[in-house]
Amino acid sequence: MTLDPGTRNLILLRHAKAEHPEHMEDIQRPLSLVGRRQAGRVGTALAADALVPDLVLCSSSVRTRQTWELARATLGAAPEVRFDEALYYAGVREVLEIVQTISDDVRTLLVVGHEPTMSHLAVGLAGPDSDPTTLARVRVGVPTASWSLLTVATPWGALEPGDAGLRRLTLAE
């Protein structure tokens, strides 16, 4: 995707499908076989859409880490990645505060996280020029291994609710 000067991409990716083993802490849950396939398709689709991130912020959970590693393997690039325990526990405001610390040199930022935070953040950031069909879909939550693409015209540090354009929701099928 070609960006206008000064415009940035924010990609909010929900982790791929995870297992639900008994007696395992939530943060330790691994991807299922379906999730592993989904995650590989994420990287391929991001590369096909020319949405290779400059920086990846990834929750520290096992399933988000696995999602990113499998996506990276098919992305054809190795962007900087920061695994952050705060993203596992973060709500919308906390994720936005983390995004606001990112350098303006980063043109495409990928956040790998959890529901409902990923969809709620996309809806909260969506401004009046957002795609209405996408906005309606994201409002009800997003499936595993899907991502919301937002365009941001402000510096990361100035990003506030309503400042972005929600462009589309992509499913890794």
Image (cartoon, helix red, strand yellow):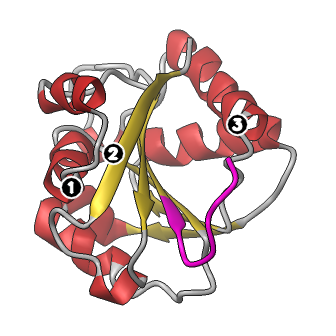
Q: In the structure shown, which secondary structural element does the residue marked by tag 1 occupy?
A: loop
Q: Which residue is mark 3?
A: 49
Q: Position of residue 39 (x, y in %)?
A: 60, 28
- Which is the main secondary structure of the residues drawn in magenta? loop
Counting residues from the start of the chain, the first of labels 1 and 2 encountered is 1
Q: The C terminus lies in which quarter of the figure?
A: top right
Disc nearest the viewer among 1 and 3: 1
Residue 157 drawn in magenta: no
- Crowdedness near tag 3: few (<14), some (14–19) or many (≥20) residues, C-alpha within 10 Å: few
Counting residues from the start of the chain, the first of labels 2 and 3 encountered is 3
Q: In the structure shown, which secondary structural element does the residue marked by tag 3 occupy?
A: loop
Quadrant housing residue 40:
top right
Q: Amino acid at mark 1?
A: Gly
Q: Is residue 112 left or right of residue 122?
A: right
Quadrant housing residue 135:
top left
Q: Which residue is mark 2?
A: 166
Q: Are marks 1 and 2 in contact (CB under 8 Å)?
A: yes
Residue 121 versus residue 29 in the image, above or below: below
In front of the other: 172 or 113: 172
Q: Are marks 2 and 3 in contact (CB under 8 Å)?
A: no
Q: Residue furthest right?
A: 76
Q: Position of residue 61 (x, y in %)?
A: 39, 50
Q: Residue 127's mark?
A: 1
Q: Position of residue 72 (x, y in %)?
A: 73, 45
Q: Which residues are magenta?
A: 1-9
Mark-to-mark CA distance, 2 and 3? 16 Å
Q: In the structure shown, which secondary structural element does the residue marked by tag 2 occupy?
A: strand
In front of the other: 79 or 52: 52
Q: Position of residue 123 (x, y in %)?
A: 17, 46
Q: Amino acid at mark 3?
A: Asp
Residue 3 seen by the camera:
yes
Q: Is residue 86 left or right of residue 8?
A: left
